[in-house]
Amino acid sequence: MSAKISIFQALVFLFYRFILRRYRNPKPKYQNGPSSLLQSDLSRHTLIFNVEGALLKSDSLFPYFMLVAFEAGGVIRSFILFILYPLISLMSHEMGVKVMVMVSFFGVKKEGFRAGRAVLPKYFLEDVGLEMFQVLKRGGKRIGVSDDLPQVMIEGFLRDYLEIDVVVGREMKVAGGYYLGIMEDKTKHDLAFDELVRKERLNTGRVIGITSFNTSLHRYLFSQFCQEIYFVKKSDKRSWQTLPRSQYPKPLIFHDGRLAIKPTIMNSLVLFMWGPFAAAAAAARLFVSLCVPYSFSIPILAFSGCRLTVTNDYVSSQKPKSSQRKGCLFVCNHRTLLDPLYVAFALKKKNIKTVTYSLSRVSEILAPIKTVRLTRDRVSDGQAMEKLLTEGDLVVCPEGTTCREPYMLRFSPLFTEVSDVIVPVAVTSNVSFFYGTTASGLKAFDPLFFLMDPYPTYTIQFLDPVSGATCQEPDGKLKFEVANHVQSEIGKALDFECTSLTRKDKYLILAGNNGVVKKN
């Protein structure tokens, strides 16, 4: 019965497209390149654009499917996609896309798939053409259409970061809560697009289509709905500039995934060639960090590719004076789980301690410095930090979670109440292949991924000490002022933007949870 209904729907759709519309709609006007639209007022018009054909500068979809394969499926799945690339390049475009979808999505749990919102937006944004974005920004209603990319890959990027009103991608077939690696038939995709655009076309103004010569969408759907169609050529894309970060409609503060490099075919080749050496390098660096004294381990690690730059090193030899018999409280922004360890390297001390809200048991065992897990109870956590300060120096990261981009999350003010002297520490880290942080993956592997990078670098900058808020005020405002001041000083030193976002905001966006890590 359902088969008969689907056949009937397809016949109705074809009849509507080729017969009724031929007489109701005038023939669209075809134009070369959308650059002329920059001089027009498009605020009352509807813009329909093809995502891969008109918005993205790159012509290859392989990196995006490789990201899905690696982040959602693992190393083996991504390696299979990599070795299939020569065969895929010999296939037709449509068949090649089907193979990449099958390899990337088959067996992936639908409920747990978050790469479309947490991983891919960063790489899509870095591939957006500035000229095309400026055209879209001038439009009224904006509809993004993809003939090749699944809806789950592009919807988060277009809606959340480019503020596109309507997104129409290919739907994925699901069985038992798992993706089958097969996209829905194009007829259903065209039906959905037809119904959607007819609904949106009720608005006043013209409907303008922007696509490329390489996509099949312009031959059918665009010509049926648009009064004007603009075609983007490969030469146009080559002359486009990349959309700068400062012009993102919504700032990219949080993103997830292990890969720090866009996995083009050549980058993927380098990654897989580096893989065996990466494991050996991580093991050797970990051994040196745990077993060799600082005076020897620092030059050995530098020789292996780990770089540490320290500025204002006077703090390590001239400890700020405190009115109490306590150690020094170092407060730093949070880039990776290794932040306290690198501060200890910079101070050349192994008896330094740190506290954490959420750290895997494996990381606690492997840590060369003492770590204490906090309970999120303000009174007991404050007492624990005060006790640790009586035993020696303490490093805290009041953001409570890491942030990869040049932004700083809100500082929890608890640290201001446990010491009358606070030393702000500005921390930056850079990697070329792998991120040493994750929101949805196994945190136990975070330090290992950082150490697997060919040249992981850290910069530690000690700032001028500030006074704490140990003297309680009736209104309790002083602790928040001190916390905000420390955040502001570190932000200025790093040229990072301070925000009021919290750990909870990050994990809700990237992982759909509150960020509590099990002790495993």
Image (cartoon, rainbow, N blue to C red):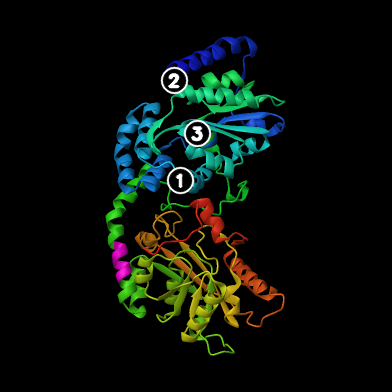
Asked whether residue 283 is drawn in magenta, I would say yes
Separation of residues labelled 1 and 2 (CA atoms): 33 Å
Q: Nearer the viewer, residue 273 or 398?
A: 398
> Which of the two discs, 1 and 2, sits closer to the camera?
2
Q: Residue at coordinates 62% horizontally, 14% vertically from top-left?
A: 27
How far apart marks 3 and 1 lie (CA) works out to 18 Å
Q: Circle 3 sits on which residue?
A: 52
Which amino acid type is shown beneath numbered disc 3?
Answer: Glu
What span is colored magenta in the figure?
Answer: 281-287
Residue at (43% x, 41% y) in the render? 110
At mark 2, the secondary structure is: helix
Q: Which residue is mark 1?
A: 115
Residue highlighted by disc 2 = 2
| Quarter of the view holding residue 345 | bottom left
Q: Is mark 2 in CB contact (under 8 Å) with mark 3? A: no
Res 111 → quadrant? top left
